[in-house]
Image: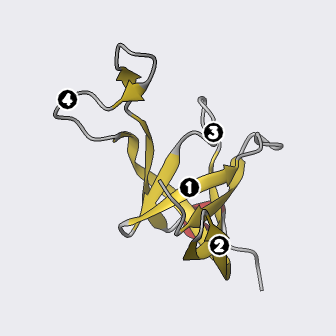
Amino acid sequence: MADKSLASRLNQQLALQEQNLVDNGIGGRRAPTGEQKWRDVDPKLWAEVIPLRGDEALKLGVQRSTQLYRVTVRARSAPIVTSQRLVWRGIALNIRSAPPSTDGQIQVLTCESGGPG
């Protein structure tokens, strides 16, 4: 059986977002008045999303269900970084690792849902 082409593997549409924060004047950062905390960088990013494993995590005394995903996207001129997040089917995926592309074609991300964010 032949391997699937990259175009056929990237069959899920996600939104790439970055934090929308400005200085609050007293040393912190906040979302601008009347705007959301996250803003779209690319609202139509095609990717391959593979769920890896689920887990129960205890963080700050709160137990949460978490799910890890491997997300493959086409390499971009501005690479995806861990300060950004992906939204897939209404689920926020926090990017845990985003190594640079090794072949110039794809970038493989490790993402987690169920965490704070």
Instruction: Give the quarter of the image for residue 50.
Output: bottom right
- Amino acid type, residue under disc 3 in the picture: Val
**For marks 1 and 3 on the same chain, the one whose residue lies earlier in the sequence:** 3
- Alpha carbon of mark 1 to alpha carbon of mark 4: how far? 24 Å
**For marks 1 and 4 on the same chain, the one whose residue lies earlier in the sequence:** 4
Determine contact: label 2, label 3, CB under 8 Å.
Answer: no
Closer to the camera: disc 2 or disc 4?
2
Q: Is mark 2 on a helix, strand or loop?
A: strand
- Alpha carbon of mark 2 to alpha carbon of mark 3: how far? 25 Å
Report the coloring of the rendering: secondary structure
The N terminus lies in which quarter of the figure? Answer: bottom right
Residue shown at the point (63%, 39%) measured from the top left: 81
**In this view, 39 is above or below 89:** above
**For marks 2 and 1 on the same chain, the one whose residue lies earlier in the sequence:** 2
Instruction: Give the quarter of the image for residue 8.
Output: bottom right
Where is residue 111 shown, x and y percent of the image? 63, 60
Instruction: Give the quarter of the image for residue 109.
Output: bottom right
**In this view, 77 is above or below 6:** above
Residue shown at the point (45%, 17%) measured from the top left: 27
Residue located farthest toward the left when viewing the structure as drawn = 34
User: Closer to the camera, 13 or 5?
Assistant: 13
- Alpha carbon of mark 2 to alpha carbon of mark 1: how far? 17 Å
Report the disc number at residue 83: none
Q: In this figure, which residue is indicated by the disc labeled 4?
A: 33
Q: What element carries label 3?
A: loop
Report the disc number at residue 81: 3
Q: In this figure, which residue is indicated by the disc labeled 2?
A: 58
